Amino acid sequence: KIRPLEVAMYIVSQLLGGLLGALVSWSVLIQGKEAAAYPALGWKVSVGSALICEFMLTLALCSVVLHVATTKAQANNSYYGLAIGFTVVSGAISVGGISGGTFNPAVGLMSVLYDSGDAGNVWIYFLGPLLGGVVAGGLFRVAACSEYTEAPSTALKRISSLLIEFLGTMMLCFTVGMSPWAGF
């Protein structure tokens, strides 16, 4: 619902904000940059595994944001922050040690500020979240059909309900399966 120029301005704002946030964190920490954290792949984690983790949790996060904070049915909903926050927490706990748990290219960009080989994987933090966001947006168009269609058919309403159930169950099982006690 926004113009391409606005999209570009938001992207630049997030990326610059992420870099500045990282730099400010250095000034707060006693040991500065050396003590600061940044996203990095876990030990012996493949690029493919990290990409899947970033994709899946960004898909979950974007889906939650779209469903609880943007629909007409959620107008005046003051608790959507809990759903969004808990999605981020569950993602950080379940895949943070695997992929770095960024779910946002601006967070992933932090790795370029450090003198490590981790900056070479920054593309994962762009590709995974961007693909996850695009898929979430496409699925939202179907799942929230009443937002886009005056009178959705009975079949479309049924598909919408089943899609929501499918996504929720898939994300639950993925998150549980990726829990730290699952072997990583």
Image (cartoon, grey):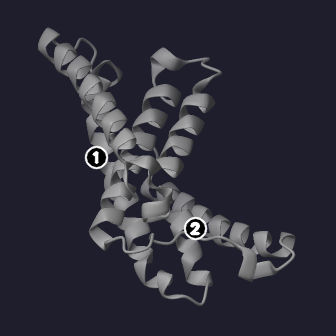
Q: Earlier in the sequence, mark 2 or mark 1?
A: 2
Q: Point out the image quarter for the N terminus.
A: top left
In percent of width and height, residue 43 lies at: 43, 73
For label 2, the crowd category at 10 Å Cα-Cα, with few meaning under 14, some 14 to 19 and many 20 or more, is some
Residue 1 visible: no
Q: Nearer the viewer, residue 103 or 174?
A: 174
In percent of width and height, residue 76 lies at: 62, 17
The disc placed on residue 15 is: 2
Note whether 183 is above or below 166 in the view shown: below
Left or right placement of residue 172 versus residue 117 in this view: left
Label 1 amino acid?
A: Val
> Element type at marker 2?
helix
Left or right placement of residue 11 versus residue 57 in this view: right
Quarter of the image for residue 166 reads top left
Left or right placement of residue 68 versus residue 137 in this view: right
Label 2 amino acid?
A: Leu
> Element type at marker 1?
helix
For label 1, the crowd category at 10 Å Cα-Cα, with few meaning under 14, some 14 to 19 and many 20 or more, is some
Q: Nearer the viewer, residue 7 or 92?
A: 92
Note whether 116 is above or below 143 in the view shown: below
Quarter of the image for residue 37 reads bottom right
Residue 183 visible: yes
The disc placed on residue 135 is: 1
Q: Point out the image quarter for the C terminus.
A: bottom left
The residue positioned 58% from the left and 67% from the top of the image is: 15
In percent of width and height, residue 41 lies at: 44, 71
The residue positioned 27% from the left and 67% from the top of the image is: 48
The disc placed on residue 74 is: none
The residue positioned 23% from the left and 26% from the top of the image is: 163
